[in-house]
Amino acid sequence: MLVEPMPPPFLRACLLLVPLLFACAPTPGADRAGHGVLLIAVDALRADHLPSGGYDRRTMPRVEQLISEGAYFEHTFAAAPQRIPSHAALLSGSDPNLARRKAPQWLEASLEQPWYLPPAVPRLGVEFLVGGAATAAFVDHADVSAAYGFAAGFQTFEGPPQGADASHGAERLVTRTLNWVRTLGRDRDWFAYVHFADLDRTWRTPDPRWDTYFEPRPELDAVPPVGTSEPSLFAIPPARFFGGVLTLGQYEARYDGALRRLDTELHRLLEELDAAGRLEHTTIALVGTFGVQFGEAGLMLDAGRLSLADLAVPFVLRPAPARFGAFDGRRIGGIASLMDVAPTLIDAAGLTVPRTMQGLTLWPAARDNAPSPRRHAFASCGIQSGYAAFNATQAIEVLLFGEGARASLVSGWFGDLERRSNWTEERLYDWRADPFPPLAAPPGLTLSETAELKAAAVAWVETVEKLRRAVQEPISVWERP
C-alpha cells in the first residue's frame, strides 16, 4: 500500500497557526455585513440543456433567474470530463494533470490512489481561509474526498455517508449548507463549496414524479444497447442500465426531469438565504463539472471523452448585489475554462490571485461586461489518453491509443486491437458550426486555420508536464521483478 505524502513541516506549522491568527484578529464592526461566496458544482450538467444554452425545455427556472441577475459565460469548457480531475481543476485553478500521480506502466494498474492534489498546488479554500473567511465544503461523492487532497483550506469538510451507494443527495446537502451558514455571525465573511452528484445517479434511482415530468421526444425512440464493460463505447454501461426497455427519448426526459428536481432544491437554498437576509450579500457561482452524453460522441448516459457533450458546461456568476450592484443578465462572449473559476472568485472577493494558478480571472470581463480574455481552453484526463484544445471556433482532439490505453476502448473504437495498439487519432473541426461531427471522418480544416491551435495545445501539454513533475512528490517504486 502506498503511503500518502505529508505536507512539508514548515507548511504544516503554518496551517496549525492559521486558526490562532484568526482568533487574535480584531472582530469586524457590527455594522458590516459579511460577504459570502457560494460555489455550486453540479456533476453531469450540460450547458445545452439549459434554456440559456438554447434548450427548448424549461429545465432549471431558478438557475435561469440567477443568470438573469448576473453574468453568464457563454462558452465554458471543463478541464476534464471525469469527476476527480474536474474538481481538481475547479478547486485549484490549475490543469488537472498536476494532480496525476504517474508511475511506471507495470505498476500503474495496482495504484490505489493515482490522484492527489499536492501541497504545492494552490487551493481555492486555502485562499479564502487565509483571507479571513470561514470555509466549508459539502460534497456528495467519495471521489471528492480528503484522501485526494480536496479538504485543504476547509474548516468544515463533509463528505457522503459510508457505503457503496451512500450519498447526501440535494435535499440533505442544502439543509447542511444552510445549517452551517446559520452558525456564522452576520459580519463574518464566508466561502462554501457545495457539490451535487444527483444527476449522475439519475439512471439507477427511479423517481416517478420527475422521471415523467417531460414527454419523451418521438424522434428519439431508439432503444440503446447495453455494453459489457465499463465504460462502454456505443452502448449503455452495465452499471447505468436501469432495466426494462427504455428509449433514448425516455432517458433524455429522465435527465431533464432530474434537472428540474435539482432546481427545486437550489431554489430552496437561495430562498432561505434570502429570508435570512444573506442573499444580497452573497456572490454565487454555479458550474457544471462535466457533461453527459446521449450518443453524440460514442457514449450513452456517461461522460469521459473530449467532446462538447462531455466538456461544454455552464458557468453562472451572480455577484452580491449589495456589494457590486445589479448585473442584469450579462452574456460574456468568448471562451472560458473551469480553471478560471477559482481566480475569478478570489479576484471578486478582493483577494490576491496566486501567481501559480494557471486559470485566468474573468472578474474584470464580468464586471465591465466585456468578452473573456481567454484565447484557448484545454482538456484532458478522459477515459482515453490524449488531450483537446479549443479556440473561439475550432477544436482539436488528439487521442493516444498506445501504452496505457484500455483494451476494451481500443477494440470498441477500432475493432482491431493489435493493429491499432499504437495508433494516434487527430480530429480537427469547427465546433461552432458542427459541435458533434461524424466520429469516423470529422471534417478537416486547413493547415493555416489549425496551425496556431495545434501549437498552443502542444505547448500547453509540455508546460503542464514540467509543472507536474515539479509539484508531485515522487512515488517510491521497486524494480520490476
Image (cartoon, grey):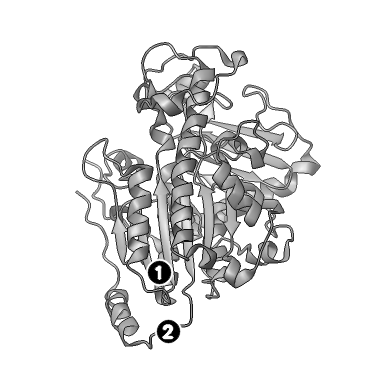
Label 1 amino acid?
Val
Residue farthest toward the front in the current orientation of the protein: 275
Q: Is residue 213 left or right of residue 404?
A: right
Examine the rendering and report whether any part of residue 297 can be seen.
Answer: yes
The Cα–Cα distance between marks 1 and 2, rounded to whole angstroms, is: 20 Å
User: Which quadrant holds the C terminus?
Assistant: top left
- Residue bearing the label numbered 1: 126
Q: Position of residue 450 (x, y in %)?
A: 74, 42
Within 10 Å of disc 1 (Cα), the crowding (few <14, some 14-19, many 20+) is many
Tell me if residue 407 can be seen.
no
Residue 46, position in %: x, y? Answer: 56, 38
Q: Nearer the viewer, residue 183 or 397?
A: 183
Q: Is residue 8 above or below residue 75?
A: below
The tag earlier along the polypeptide, 1 or 2, is 2
Residue at coordinates 66% horizontally, 64% vertically from top-left? 326
Marker disc for residue 28: 2
Q: Quadrant of residue 214?
A: top right
Numbered disc in front, either 1 or 2: 2
User: Relative to residue 283, is residue 444 drawn left or right?
Assistant: right
- The amino acid marked with disc number 2 is Pro
**Of the numbered discs in the image, which one, if any, rests on residue 11?**
none
Residue 59 in the image: x percent, y percent?
Answer: 56, 35
Question: Residue 446: horizontal and vertical position, in percent?
Answer: 79, 36
438 vs 208, nearest the viewer: 208
Q: Of 295 and 314, which appears nearest the observer?
A: 314
Q: Give the residue displayed 73% in from the left and 28% down from the top.
A: 443
**Residue 5 occupies which quadrant of the picture?**
bottom left
